[in-house]
Amino acid sequence: MISLANTPLLLHGRDHHLPTKRRAPFTVRSSSSLQEVDKSPTTAEDSKLRSELCASVPFPPIKAAKRVVLVRHGQSTWNEEGRIQGSSNFSVLTKKGEAQAETSRQMLIDDSFDICFSSPLIRSKRTAEIIWGTREDEIITDSDLREIDLYSFQGLLKHEGKAKFGPAFRQWQVDAANFNIDGHYPVRELWGRARNCWTKILAHESKSVLVVAHNAVNQALVATAIGNSYIYLLRRVRGNVGSNWCRRNRRKRSVFTYVFTFVDVSGLGTEYFRILLQSNCGVSVLDFIPRPDGGSPLICLNRLNQTPGSPVATGSSAGRRTSRRIILVCQGSTQDSEATVSKLDDQQMNMLGVIQAQKTAELLLDLKLSTIISSPNNACAQTATIISQVQEAADCLGADCVPRYVEMKNIPDLDVAEIFQPSTKDTTDVSYLRPGWLNGLDDRVTSTLRERSGQAWHSLLTELSDESEEEKIVVAVAHPVAHIALIGHCLNLTEEWLGSFHLDAGSISVVDFPDGPTGRGIIRCINYTAHLGRWSIPITRSTVDDDSF
């Protein structure tokens, strides 16, 4: 256990010392809880500093690959009522919530989890019990996994919170990271708790971990994990560099040195609260990959918010209605059975790829798509065509009374094949199914990928800004690598974060824009594959063997 008190830490080149003066404990009573909790008061500066330190300390090393599956509890009675729950413990699962938990149990039924961690709150613990089923091992409850502490907000209906607290409630809606109530910054406190949870989860000797908790805390767990590691970067520099991690390449009298460097990338901060959606019983998966020389593991978000229901069903994102959406569709599987970087050329889909495209088209049938934008790559164009044909046949398929016309466009910036072909001369060819594989590429490649995908992302936002339609849904079809880069742009991340995401062929990812294309995108799901049916990618099965990590 790392103690932050009385310990000087060097953070981004600055020495920080936490306050050491002891204060007398005092009692906080939640408006909706009968339980009293002893806490030490903290100033706003102390709270912010603790959050910053917790987010910046590297994760502990692990000896073997570890997969962590996060599940949010099913619908609760207070969810149904629209009541602010926070860390109160008065609501229970509804019948719908029980059914959602059962669906999640079926999704995870083939996994032999080593351990289950759960929030101690009734709604979460009951969800864990349903998913855990007949397994003999006990469920470990951890108070740090409880939902965000919202103090005086807890128990209020949303309109009551707005009427009673006015500006504070407004800040909770639009600037949650700086939201203050009863002398506390709940989101900052939550981020610190999430970091503590990871320390305990990673310290446990297990390879497959189930964690059942809540909306806000699962968001914090995902955000504090993404990119929170030392990553390898292969950089090309001109001249002679004294390093054991380098190799030279003489071209036209110039000396270029390829140097492996280590970059400390901290997790995403509190400003990402409400950006990474967690629906009731939504499943998110994180892979933790040990480094050969020890140290903080590589971390890859394998999927986000795979829900019991449809990921494209109409509804709200983070409690807000949206009329602008981008759906990222990964092309179907191709004839490249090895799925290696060197074979990212213009290939046709195989039979599995055609089935995947048809399943995706079926999933999108209930939506009226505005535009389908595709990479000119053959597999992408085939996938886009299949989706378009199903949309146009909506009348005979029973979805509409009239055929739909969907505009189709090609964007060369979505094609990534030519970016990777030169790189295979300088880097080891790897499978793009391997979690975190982008971390090992030459920075020239990742920089080019980010620049080119940035132009594609701008084109998608421009398409989305067309106000001729009240509701605008744009589908983008490309290779998984291109979509990983687009997700990075949506989250405003640099290329160092590209290895933090994984996508499978045939998967979809959904981004909503409740504030329009000029506002922040809310990630509704990443790498959703349940629509593929029997051809879907199992949630908890790794795409590679542990030994090859």
Image (cartoon, helix red, strand yellow):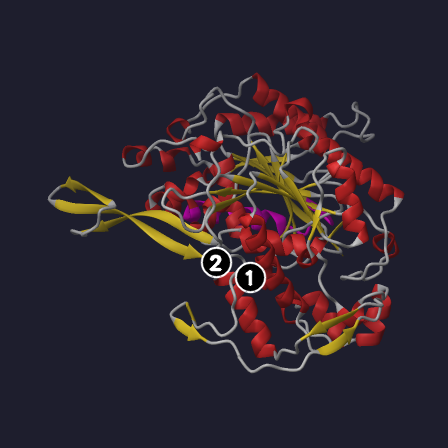
Mark 2 neighbour density, 10 Å: few (under 14) some (14–19) many (20 or more): many
User: 118 or 535: nearer the eye?
Assistant: 118
Image position of 176 with respect to 212: above or below: below
At a point 44% along the width and 43% down the height, the residue shown is 290
Image quadrant occupied by the C terminus: top left
Q: Secondary structure at mark 2?
A: loop
Region of the chain picked out in magenta, as a range: 450-472
Residue 402 - label: none
Label 1: element kind: loop
Relative depth, front residue between 163 and 437: 437
**CA neighbours of label 1 inside 10 A, class few (<14), some (14 to 19), many (20+):** some
Circles 1 and 2: CB atoms closer than 8 Å: yes
Foreground residue, 247 or 469?
Answer: 247
Q: Is residue 133 above or below residue 460?
A: above
Q: Residue at x 86, y 55 (%)?
A: 91
The amino acid type, in three-letter code, at marker 1 is Gly
Q: Which mark is residue 269?
A: 1
Query: Residue 287 at what x, y percent from top left?
Result: 53, 41
Q: Which residue is mark 2?
A: 266
